[in-house]
Amino acid sequence: MTEPTPPPPAASSGASDAQVHVFSPNAGLIDGVPVTAPPYGDIQDVVLSILQQRAQQLGAPTPATITDNRYGGAIRLLIHPDGTTEQLD
């Protein structure tokens, strides 16, 4: 009897985009959870760090849709376990 082949990590994790909303230079939400930057820090660094940790835990790149209210725009990124990012269409 053969063992079933497990699905690739992206399929098993659901691979839906993390939903990020940035409100100010030091406050935002990731999937509805509040995140803040330390004094003199930047929320962008905090968000990317959290998403990188998520990618490391999953062992696969993490897609994210980032809506930045400071600039009125949104972008989709793929964050890799090593911290590199790339823009998605």
Image (spheres, rainbow, N blue to C red):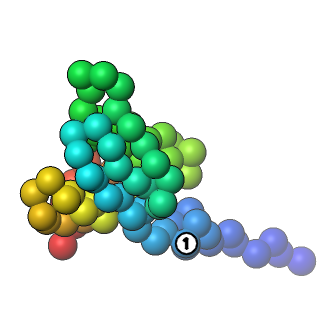
The number of numbered discs placed on residues in the rendered structure image is: 1
Q: Nearer the viewer, residue 81 or 41?
A: 41
Residue 81 visible, this orientation: no
Give the residue number, with chain letter if any, for mark 1: 14
The quarter of the image holding the N terminus is bottom right
Q: Position of residue 2 (x, y in %)?
A: 83, 75
State the residue at coordinates (32%, 58%).
21
> Quadrant of residue 41 in the image?
top left
State the residue at coordinates (81%, 72%).
3
Instruction: Classify 36 as above or below 86.
Output: above
Question: Going by the image, does 46 lie left or right of 11?
Answer: left
Q: Secondary structure at mark 1?
A: loop
Q: Position of residue 25 (x, y in %)?
A: 22, 39
The quarter of the image holding the C terminus is bottom left
Question: Going by the image, does 86 lie left or right of 62?
Answer: left
Question: Going by the image, does 86 lie left or right of 83?
Answer: left
Q: Nearer the viewer, residue 19 or 3?
A: 19
Q: Nearer the viewer, residue 61 or 8?
A: 61
Question: Going by the image, does 61 lie left or right of 67?
Answer: right
Give, as a three-letter code, the residue at label 1. Gly
Q: Nearer the viewer, residue 54 or 28?
A: 28
Q: Residues within 10 Å of mark 1 (few under 14, many from 20)?
A: few
State the residue at coordinates (55%, 72%).
14
> Quadrant of residue 7 in the image?
bottom right
Q: Position of residue 82 (x, y in %)?
A: 37, 37
Residue 70 visible, this orientation: yes
